[in-house]
């Protein structure tokens, strides 16, 4: 069949019997039938795309690059050069099915882009972002127009104007979703430059759509000016119908569905059909079908309906169907068609000038706004990101015969190179000035009793929020020692643009969430802000970190250092099941915790959340907890005691400190190193200070227990499990105590230490929450003497409450 690839026989391919095969045992070749062939093509595209994603991940390249590269590899530039491969896997007769499916994927993807895009954000971007967006579009557009004269063939049936428009749009657009991903990869999303470039890219995207619609209208008109006019009038009418008829209809559907209820299948089907109808109408009137889908997506109000649609479509569309569109672009790209050194020289020149044009345009505007030149250059480079809109422009241009093979291949390579070089150049060029933060209070033990305690709380999901709030309330904020809490919602950086739109500063609270992640973020923030209103002497500042799990600890550490935090609280990677066991929620959370323990600039507490008593009671006078500290010795245990000591001042907290002391025989047998003796001395000093200070406190019980081995230690721990709500233990890092000997051999989670692991394990009878503490040792590991929290000595050396609250509200 592949050999008979001529037009007179291709009609047979669409006979009903040629869709599916009777099977290889009947002598059929599956690749002669359209369905098995399509499935094979789709599989190949996805596999090769994923392969490139994997290869390019260390280079921080966006997924678009992998998708276009995948298409180029499969196309006539590489594998397609072999006639047998081309005729077997991508025969001419299969292209129609492939392109149709790719366009269906594109249709729904642009519908989702429309749903996620918030026009209100574009309206509120402010003058700076608007002028930067325009400044960054004008020069590249003019460069494209200039080059169009050298690249335009005189025998083309289309006018010079259309050609200028296509090349200009292709060079001047910025891909908002791709840019968002690059910013998050470079950890610039929460910086000033990140916010400006995101806003400018949004504005740029909107302009690009208008220009694209105009370009298509002109391309399809075939020099009859009245036809172009009719296309524009009918497009404007379509937009008006969407805004004044469709949007109220969808708002009615939202009102009709009770809050918290799922939308009925009928309504969802109606909207998904509406996408295709919109595509059909805009295709019929002469603009591209994707324009209709995009506008239809824009008129859907942000909120639960948009959230439902995104959840139902996102993975299937962007994971499976969208790579097809990029693959088609690659299949049409024949690098061999770029012939002669002159053409390659033109290609280099286009890349350089288009890139330089956007940078110069942006730098000029940024200079007027008083931004440094280096930031202006960075901004210009970031706005050079290319992606979906440009590929649509090029594909439409090729389909309409505006662009020939050579120009098309040139422009695809321009997009590829311009997007590919951004990350490495920006990494070298723009390094935000890292203030060398030197602050002393990196641990709770060092924090003075009359100064502010700064805590960074990391949250993955709303599930951990009630226990963390109760833990913070138990931490006893007072007028003398208030607590400043930074809430950091940890969000994984995925390939979706939707995850990017959570920047709290750009959103007004009370507006509906754009996606599930944002809905979770809102839920978490509302809970903590509600706590702040009900509790005294507490300041809450919500933030979001969007990054891959492998580098998420960097965001946490840099924020902790930036905000001069003394203590980081992060949830354990396992959560309690209904039957009391522990199961992993997400293995990647464990990686974050391990990296954080290794690199943290202050003390860290891992919270094993099994619920705390009074999870719903948030007023300060009603919380009542039984807290136990298991003290074996060492810096981590001293830090655990320092935190519990602070808690013990709360009227509703009862504290039990159980100190484990090695049996005399064990001590004499062991060759105690000098360091261990020093640690023992420090422990004695600290415990004595604690006991002297709290001698008359009835709510504090101090017990010493002499044990000789790990078995006795476990038995002692098990004997006290049922009567407490919270265990606070040190991680015991670097301390080899005979009391925990043998316990580490069976550890499931060594990052919790021997005792923490025992308390957090599924077979431990108690359902008690555990806080495993690791003290920061970096700045004072060599010091012989440590400040005691309640000791008034040396307190005159540091001013009280040096750091003001940084709460923006």
Image: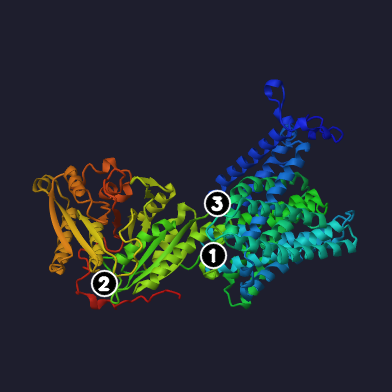
Q: Quadrant of the N terminus?
A: top right
Which residue lies under the disc numbered 2? 448
Q: Is residue 445 above or below residue 421?
A: below
- Residue 132: percent from the left, percent from the top? 65, 71
* Colour convention of the picture: rainbow
Q: Quadrant of residue 30?
A: top right
Residue 546 shows in the view: yes
Determine the CA span between mark 1 and mark 3: 17 Å
- Residue 639: percent from the left, percent from the top? 25, 61
Left or right: residue 8 versus residue 491 is right
Q: Which mark is residue 430?
A: 1
Determine the CA span between mark 1 and mark 2: 38 Å
The mark nearer the N terminus, 2 or 3, is 3
Residue 331 shows in the view: no
Q: Is residue 282 above or below residue 338?
A: below
Determine the CA span between mark 2 and mark 3: 45 Å
The mark nearer the N terminus, 1 or 3, is 3
| Nearer mark to the viewer, of 1 and 2 | 2
């Amino acid at each position: 069949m592949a050999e008979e690839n001529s037009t007179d026989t291709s009609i047979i391919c669409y006979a009903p019997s040629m869709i599916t095969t009777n099977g290889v045992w009947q002598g059929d070749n599956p690749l002669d039938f359209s369905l098995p062939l399509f499935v094979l093509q789709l599989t190949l595209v996805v596999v090769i795309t994923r392969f490139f994603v994997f290869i390019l991940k260390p280079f921080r390249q966006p997924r678009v690059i992998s998708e276009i590269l995948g298409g180029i590899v499969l196309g006539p530039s590489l594998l397609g050069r072999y006639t047998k491969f081309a005729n077997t896997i991508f025969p001419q007769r299969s292209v129609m099915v492939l392109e149709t499916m790719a366009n269906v994927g594109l249709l729904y993807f642009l519908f989702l882009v429309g749903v996620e895009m918030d026009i209100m954000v574009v309206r509120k971007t402010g003058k700076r972002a608007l002028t930067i967006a325009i400044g960054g579009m004008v020069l590249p557009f003019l460069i494209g127009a200039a080059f169009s004269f050298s690249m335009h063939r005189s025998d083309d049936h289309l006018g010079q104007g259309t050609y200028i428009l296509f090349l200009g749009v292709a060079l001047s657009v910025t891909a908002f979703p791709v840019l968002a991903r690059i910013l998050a990869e470079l950890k610039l999303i929460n910086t000033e430059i990140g916010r400006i470039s995101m806003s400018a890219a949004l504005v740029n995207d909107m302009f690009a759509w208008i220009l694209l619609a105009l370009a298509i209208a002109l391309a399809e008109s075939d020099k009859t000016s009245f036809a172009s006019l009719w296309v524009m009038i009918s497009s404007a009418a379509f937009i008006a119908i969407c805004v004044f008829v469709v949007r109220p209809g969808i708002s009615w559907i939202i009102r009709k569905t009770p809050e918290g209820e799922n939308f009925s299948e009928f309504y969802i089907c109606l909207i998904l059909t509406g996408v295709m109808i919109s595509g059909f109408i805009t295709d019929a009137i002469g603009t591209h079908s994707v324009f209709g889908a995009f506008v239809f997506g824009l008129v859907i109000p942000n909120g639960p309906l948009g959230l439902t649609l995104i959840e139902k479509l996102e993975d299937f569309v962007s994971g499976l169907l969208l790579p097809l569109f990029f693959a088609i672009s690659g299949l049409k790209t024949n690098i061999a068609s770029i012939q002669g050194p002159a053409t390659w020289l033109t290609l280099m020149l286009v890349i350089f000038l288009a890139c330089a044009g956007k940078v110069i345009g942006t730098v000029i505007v940024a200079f007027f706004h008083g931004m440094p030149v280096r930031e202006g250059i960075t901004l210009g480079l970031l706005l050079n990101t290319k992606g979906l809109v440009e590929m649509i422009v090029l594909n439409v241009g090729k389909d309409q015969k505006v662009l020939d093979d050579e120009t098309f291949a040139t422009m695809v390579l321009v997009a590829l190179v311009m997007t590919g070089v951004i990350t490495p150049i920006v990494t070298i060029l723009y390094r935000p000035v890292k203030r060398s933060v030197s602050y002393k209070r990196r641990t709770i033990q060092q924090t003075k009793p009359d100064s502010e305690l700064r805590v960074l709380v990391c949250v993955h999901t709303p599930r951990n929020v009630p226990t963390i709030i109760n833990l913070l309330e138990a931490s006893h904020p007072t007028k003398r020692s208030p607590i400043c809490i930074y809430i950091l919602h940890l969000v994984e950086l995925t390939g979706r643009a939707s995850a990017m739109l959570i920047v709290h500063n750009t959103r007004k609270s009370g507006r509906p969430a754009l996606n599930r992640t944002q809905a979770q973020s809102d839920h978490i923030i509302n809970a903590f802000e509600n706590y702040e209103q009900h509790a005294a002497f507490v300041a809450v500042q919500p933030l979001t970190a969007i990054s891959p799990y492998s580098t998420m600890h960097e965001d946490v550490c840099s924020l902790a250092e930036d905000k001069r935090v003394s203590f980081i609280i992060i949830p354990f990677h396992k959560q309690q099941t209904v039957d009391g066991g522990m199961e992993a929620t997400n293995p990647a959370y464990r990686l974050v915790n391990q990296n954080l323990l290794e690199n943290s600039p202050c003390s860290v507490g891992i919270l094993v959340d099994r619920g705390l008593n009074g999870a719903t009671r948030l007023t300060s006078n009603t919380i009542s907890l039984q807290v136990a500290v298991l003290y074996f010795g060492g810096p981590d245990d001293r830090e655990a005691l320092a935190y519990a000591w602070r808690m013990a001042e709360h009227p509703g907290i009862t504290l039990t400190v159980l100190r484990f002391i090695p049996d005399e025989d064990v001590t004499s047998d062991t060759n105690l190193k000098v360091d261990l003796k020093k640690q023992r001395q420090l422990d004695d000093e600290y415990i004595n200070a604690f006991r002297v200070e709290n001698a008359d406190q009835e709510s504090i019980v101090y017990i010493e227990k002499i044990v000789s081995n790990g078995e006795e230690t476990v038995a002692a721990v098990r004997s006290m499990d049922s009567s407490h709500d919270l265990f606070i233990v040190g991680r015991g890092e670097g301390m080899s105590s005979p009391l925990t000997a043998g316990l580490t051999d069976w550890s499931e989670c060594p990052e919790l230490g021997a005792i923490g692991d025992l308390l957090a394990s599924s077979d431990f009878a108690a359902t008690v929450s555990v806080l495993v503490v690791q003290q920061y040792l970096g700045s004072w590991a060599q010091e012989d003497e440590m400040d005691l929290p309640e000791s008034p000595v040396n307190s005159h050396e540091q001013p009280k409450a040096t750091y003001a609250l940084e709460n923006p509200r």
